[in-house]
Amino acid sequence: MRHSLLAVALSLGLAGPALAQGTTPGSQPPLRCAVDGTFAPHAFPTLQGGVQGFNVDLFREAARRMGRELVVDSASFSGLIPAMNAGRYDFLCAPTTATAERAANMLFTEGYLYTAFQFGIRRGSAPITSLDELRGKAISVNKGSAYDAWAQANAARYGFTVQTYDTQPDAVQAVVSGRAYANLGGNTVVRYAATRTPQFVPDFVIRETRAHWSAPLPMGATALRVQLENALECMKRDGTIARLSQQWFGSAPAEDDAEHVVFPGTGVPGLPGYDATPREPRC
């Protein structure tokens, strides 16, 4: 009897992506994840009281391919990682920047999006092709954001002035109204704002700020990470993530963007917790 139980436990522990992809929905308990439900277009409230957005659609489809239902909670981002590490969530659906500091305390899947600093300008304005072209111009930012910090730190170097606003929509309106030449924000938020404001268009991306937005999991959840990453990689290969990106952010990702790229190994290359063992997606 003990040998039989051990065999079952081993079979569950060693179950790989192929088993997860073929599992009948409902035969395993739902996966639990959480988002910051105020971060449009990644996750924001529906009129019915739930949440919608790119990340909600992304991970519901990933869970479906894993043969699992998905329960999505909405909470403040500051509490999500502690709650996951306390066992409340299996992983986080919220867009989370993979950093070395975070990767020392949790596992990350490979990136499904790149997060980067991007400028948006008024339609008809001359495009920005380098940071040197900002000299003498006013840049709007959301007060207290990472983009505000970058702008304040680089204003003297590139010769621009900084206008801070209490909200990102206010910073966008400063550009549309002509008070500022460009708005600096996150690439997905800038692209989303352009879908809502016809006179505002995405422009120059500061490529050196590019980082992976990945799904974090608790330390030790190596089998689940492989299954989740496998599903995401299959969604890259068949174009699902690129289609969701265009649907929610208003423009098609480039071929070298993370929506398309299947990265080698498991996790984010170069960060703690990365497993370089070659692994072919099983779709």
Image (cartoon, rainbow, N blue to C red):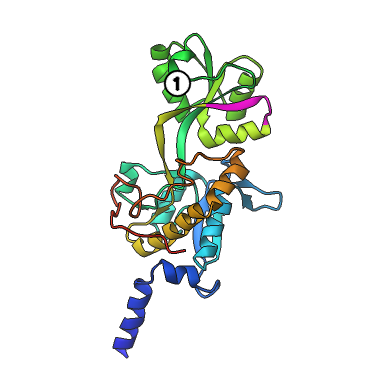
- Check if residue 206 falls in the magenta segment: no
State the residue at coordinates (46%, 48%): 112
Q: From where the camera sits, is residue 61 visible?
A: yes
Q: Quadrant of residue 72?
A: bottom right
In the depicted structure, whether residue 82 falls above or below residue 210 = below
29 or 232: which is nearer to us?
232
For residue 158, above or below residue 74: above
Q: Residue at x 60, y 36 (%)?
A: 192
State the extent of the magenta-drawn residues as a range: 197-203
Q: Position of residue 166 (x, y in %)?
A: 57, 26
Amino acid type at mark 1: Ala
272 horizontally vs 208: left or right? left
Which residue reaches farthest bottom? Answer: 1
Residue 203 placement: quadrant:
top right
The picture quadrant where one finds residue 127 is top right
Q: Is residue 97 left or right of residue 180?
A: left
x and y, in percent, of residue 89 in the image: 46, 58
x and y, in percent, of residue 160 in the image = 47, 12
